[in-house]
Amino acid sequence: MTPSELFIKKKLDERRIAGNLRFLKPQNSLVDFCSNDYLGFARSPVLKNKIEQEIKNNEKPSNGSTGSRLLSGNSDYALALEGYIASLHQSKASLLFNSGYDANLGLFSSLPQRGDTIITDELIHASIIDGARLSYANRYTFKHNDLQALEDKLSQAKGNCYVAIESVYSMDGDTSPIAEILNLADKYNAHLIVDEAHAVGLYGLGIIDGSLKDRVFAKVVTFGKGLGCHGAVVLGSTLLKEYLVNFARSFIYTTAAPLHQLASVKMAYRLLLDSSDQAEILRQNILHFKKNIKHNNTYPLIKSDSAIQCIVLKSNEKAKLLAEHLQNNGLDVRAILSPTVPAESERIRICLHSFNTKNEITLLSDIINSFINE
């Protein structure tokens, strides 16, 4: 083996020994309790038909966009879609990205400069962490949802300060005290950026609305969760959009999304506006699960009112064992292992959906109850 191959093998062997080696699993026919398709849009025949009709209505459909948006890949359709999305979210402007990862990478790598400060919740998504690492700004984290810890970091901030949070956290499913964080940001002249990836759908167009939206510097919305398609958008001022078009490398140096992706996003938004019943069914399913689950202090249920519900098993082995037990009973629940989450916070992450039946949820909770209370 070459030195590089020896290094690769060593790192993989370390993961195998620790029991947290990642690998791709084939698609299965188990009951879905692991995907982010909270409202069932990804599997919706209604959405599929709307997308097909929208593409047919387009005069010049194409298989690909042919280039980046600054070269040959821009279109009137993309520009109109950005205007439509901005108006729905009551924002001045929006800029499309090819994924939520690209959006956060582009925003956080280009906006904060050397001498500026980025302060993130300790449970912030990896895409924001990676974007912040690519900037030359000072970086701090604060204890999850801890206002005093945030203020301690704000008091040390230099230059332009950007605070990054999620409205609904992807690994815990809990929500941020956004109004209180905004008050602290205002006190220290900091700018708040909110990732709404896991809020859109269950919470309508997101948690940031009303008087809050005018105080938030930027909002990131992804389309691969509640909207059931792909891509993302950064919402903010027209000045911010112009800046990102000029400096966000993950926007500038990538092939633009094709028409099918853009049409999917547009039709998903339209379906969302007409599908409040699905959000209510999802809310009832969340309540049904929480009513039936019998967690304990040893293996607690993380407090959450969102579609993401987590039982903390405190070890990779126990998390994998419970996940495998559920899968053997026909339920697709996945273990979330360290280092994705901190050591001793390993868990099973349950994603509830509007299409899950009450009987499926009851079976899920019964099996978990038996496992953690035996």
Image: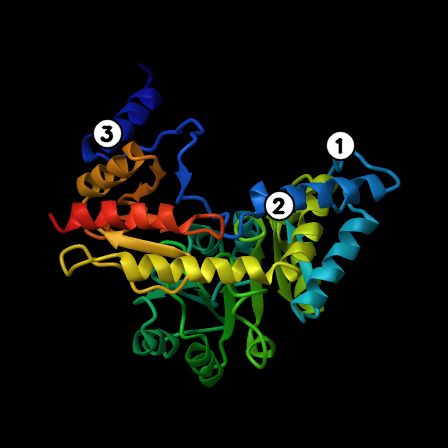
Q: Which circle's residue, 2 or 3, is located before the other in the chain? A: 3
Marks 1 and 2, Cα distance to the nearest angstrom? 16 Å
Q: Amino acid at mark 3?
A: Arg
Bin the neighbour count of mark 3 within 10 Å (Cα to Cα): few under 14, some 14-19, many 20 and up: few
Q: Residue at x 42, y 54 (%)?
A: 125
Say the numbered circle drawn on residue 228. Answer: none
> Which x, y percent locates residue 268?
65, 51
For disc 1, the marked residue is 63
For label 3, the SS is: helix
Up the image or down, 273 lies above or below 217; here it is: above
| Mark 1 or 2, closer to the camera | 1
For label 2, the SS is: loop
Nearest the eye: 266 or 115: 266
Q: Amino acid at mark 1?
A: Asn
Left or right? Give the position of 80 relative to 186.
Answer: right
Q: Residue furthest left?
A: 374
> Which x, y percent locates residue 71?
78, 42
Left or right? Give the position of 196 relative to 262.
Answer: left
Up the image or down, 53 lies above or below 217; here it is: above
For disc 2, the marked residue is 98
